[in-house]
Amino acid sequence: MTTQSDFFVIGVDGGASKTAAVVMDQAARILGQGQSGSSNYHNVGLDRAKMNLRAAMSAAAEQAGLELNRAAAVTWALAGVGRPVDKSLFANLAAEILPDIPVQVEHDTVAALMGGLGSRQGIVLIAGTGMSVAGENNGKRARAGGWGYYLDHGSAHGLAQQALQALAQAADGRRPPTRLTARILEALGLSQADDLVSWVYDPQRELAEIAALAPLVLDAAEAGDLAAIEVVAEGAEALADSVDAVARRLDFWATPFHLVLAGGLMGNSFYRRVVAQAVRTRVPGAYPIVPRADPTVGAGLLALESTGHRSAAPVVAPPVGDVWSSEQRNILTRDLDLHPVLTVVGLMHVQDKQAVSAVARTLPAIAAAVDDVAERMRHGGRLIYVGAGSSGRLGVVDAAECGPTFSLEPGKIVAVIAGEVQAFTDSVEGAEDDADEGAAAIRELALGRLDAIVGIAASGRTPFVLGAMEEARQRGVLTIALICNLPAPLADLADHVIAPLVGPEALAGSTRLKAGTAQKLVLNMLSTAVMVRLGKTYGNLMVNVRIENKKLQARARRIVAQAGDVDEEAAARVLAASGDDVKTAIVSILRGCPPHEARLRLEHAGGVVRLALQDE
């Protein structure tokens, strides 16, 4: 019979680089530790994984002065066991190595969460040689990443691989020179970039050797190397993507929760801060923390838990704060004024690419808004943009450009800007703070249920826009919020929320930069896609173009020629016979009918070229 004095459990954390084991007593005191090579069988094979598991546990038991086969319980928390078939393999392996001892096989993220929090309630991000994100919320589990070195990004191997690609591109002259070249070649003892081919593709090359280059990349990024910064930024965004996916599946997204940043790569304070910034931008409820104990201890706590012993008390609930990410200081551009101009503009370009990525994540929301707006405009409704400052100016520009591009009658797309016309070229101080003026602007337009309004505000809390949206909502108008921060009051007033979360600007608080870029991209998509749905185009051709100057005359000829697959001379003749109406000319050519018949077809088709071409 086992007594308290000889009671012990074993926890094992096995990854792509190493396997670590710990022996713990019933009070969670560490009695012994051991370490060996990788136990990720996808990388080293099952036999080697078995050998390394046994070696790590034996070393820990020996240091504790205990017999391995007398353990009360064992937990193996391993990378590469995300599928049932993987767990089954290791359950059989456990029966071979530790007969008659209860062994639970868990994914390594579970132990990292347990070690980091002392509880399973939260999310853990592990970034070492590989990466994985997992969490639990009231018994519900979710996981993302952990697909291996070919498919995951943001890990040490991922950063190193991207850095090697950047080095190769610089050697080819496809990108500017980078300090990564000298740093990596020196570290590997190579004399020139061409030597990398033999080193990288050596059949004996191990993943850990490539992953070991990641600290060089992080050092170069922190020192201001543009190529390295780009690699680091993309890696952090990839990790934030996975946290976002898990948080949404666990209903954590809008609720404060702890996020444990674990793994060897998260030990680098610079990368940890960049990743935390990316995560907080995407998942406002996340509260990143460093683990209070390593995953090996977490595995030991899981083993203790399986025997009925309580684990250590979990950390306190995360604080709740008002997160406004676009106003925060960007870690990647903190020394902006110290860099050469090429680096300054390069850093801004890196941030702009983040804006494009942020918009990509809102495409379903944009599409849903387009369908609702188009349906209302099809029945006579209007599209109204409301904004202040840079956001308001973007609305004015889009509304102004839609008229000539799609031959819209005046008043179909209208822009309202705080401070009125003067605010388009000059700053009108205080105009954006007047919610009553925003509401008055909507009343003046006499909006109704067929109309749609887009409230544009990077912060999501501009009073002028809030006043306009509140008034519009009371009138039954379709409300759409185009914002770059969440949570935000404007989102609470909207039927559709389009929120490209771009995070801190290159220049803190200057939302005319990537927030403005994201808003412009969304407005382009919104108005253009609505016009496509309303039949204002034929394929990707602007068939509703107004011919008001020589440039537009030439464009009209090209459009007719391209649509009808004729030369421009023939297009010009038909266009002239059609009274310079592009749609009539296209239908005339494609149906082989005279312009007057083409015009009748268009009238019956509601002006939609595609419908006018169909057989009646």
Image (spheres, helix red, strand yellow):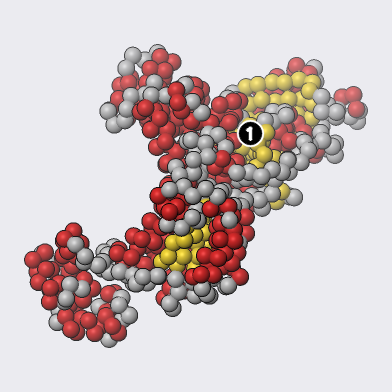
Number of marks in picture: 1
Above or below residue 284? Residue 101 is: above
At label 1, the amino acid type is Leu
Residue at x 57%, y 73% (from the top left corner) = 476
Looking at the picture, tell me which residue is in the foreground, 299 or 499.
499
Res 74 quadrant in image? top right
Looking at the picture, tell me which residue is in the foreground, 279 or 355.
355
Residue at x 62%, y 55% (from the top left corner) = 489
Residue at x 56%, y 57% (from the top left corner) = 464
Which residue matches tag 1? 261
Residue at x 53%, y 31% (from the top left corner) = 331
Residue 309: x %, y % from top left: 85, 36
Residue 259: x %, y % from top left: 66, 39
Residue 167: x %, y % from top left: 36, 26
Q: Is residue 214 visible?
A: no
Above or below residue 601? Residue 414 is: above
